[in-house]
């Protein structure tokens, strides 16, 4: 009887460990790239923990989505002059300049254009 209980407990422990490993490796915080200095291009960061959540290599003026977990950005290089952020899904309406090193609440800006 004890041997059966030991086997069942071992099987459950192995299944739990496998599930936790799969869950943790898929989470945004565990999968995020850490802050680097210097970095390249336009880089979007999350706040907790500070990790890279998006990148753009060069400015192109195309309306793009702000990464969902982004709370600030930094244009390291690549010729980025202006990065207006919009609270709309189509880059319409009032814009705020994001390229002046300030942060915002997660999800506050939905789209941006980098030029």
Image (tube, rainbow, N blue to C red):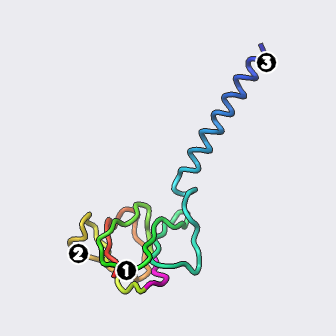
Q: Nearer the viewer, residue 100 or 3?
A: 3
Q: Nearer the viewer, residue 38 or 98?
A: 38
SS under mark 1: loop
Of circles 1 and 2, the one toward us is: 1
Alpha carbon distance from label 3 to label 2: 69 Å
Residue 102 horizontal/vertical position (percent): 42, 78
Residue under the image location 20 percent in, 72 percent down: 93
- Say if 66 sits above or below 39 in the image: above
Q: Is residue 2 left or right of residue 58?
A: right
SS under mark 3: helix
Splitting the image into 4 quarters, where does residue 14 fall? top right
Query: Which residue was labeled with disc 3?
Result: 3
Q: Does label 3 or label 2 sit earlier along the sequence?
A: 3
Query: Which residue was labeled with disc 2?
Result: 94
Residue 39 horizontal/vertical position (percent): 55, 78
Residue neighbourhood size for the residue with mark 2, other residues' Cα within 10 Å, grouped as few (<14), some (14–19), many (≥20): few
Q: Does label 1 or label 3 sit earlier along the sequence?
A: 3
Alpha carbon distance from label 1 to label 3: 65 Å
Q: Is residue 85 left or right of residue 51?
A: left
The secondary structure that dominates the magenta segment is loop
Q: Quadrant of the N terminus?
A: top right
Q: Are marks 1 and 2 in contact (CB under 8 Å)?
A: no
Q: What is the magenta range?
A: 74-78
Query: Which residue was labeled with disc 1?
Result: 59
- Say if 81 sits above or below 1 in the image: below
Residue neighbourhood size for the residue with mark 1, other residues' Cα within 10 Å, grouped as few (<14), some (14–19), many (≥20): some
Splitting the image into 4 quarters, where does residue 51 fall? bottom right
Residue under the image location 30 percent in, 78 percent down: 61
SS under mark 2: loop
Q: Does label 1 or label 2 sit earlier along the sequence?
A: 1
Membership of 14 in magenta stretch: no
């Amino acid at each position: 009887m004890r041997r059966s209980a030991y086997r069942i407990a071992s099987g459950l422990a192995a299944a739990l460990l496998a599930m936790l490993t799969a869950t943790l490796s898929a989470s945004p915080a565990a999968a995020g790239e850490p802050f680097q200095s210097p970095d390249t291009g336009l880089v979007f960061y999350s706040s907790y923990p500070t990790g890279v959540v998006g990148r753009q290599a060069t400015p192109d003026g195309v309306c793009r989505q702000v990464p969902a977990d982004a709370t600030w950005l930094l244009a390291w290089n690549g010729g980025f002059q202006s990065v207006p952020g919009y609270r709309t899904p189509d880059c319409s309406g009032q814009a705020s300049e994001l390229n002046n090193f300030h942060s915002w609440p997660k999800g506050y800006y939905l789209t941006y254009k980098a030029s």
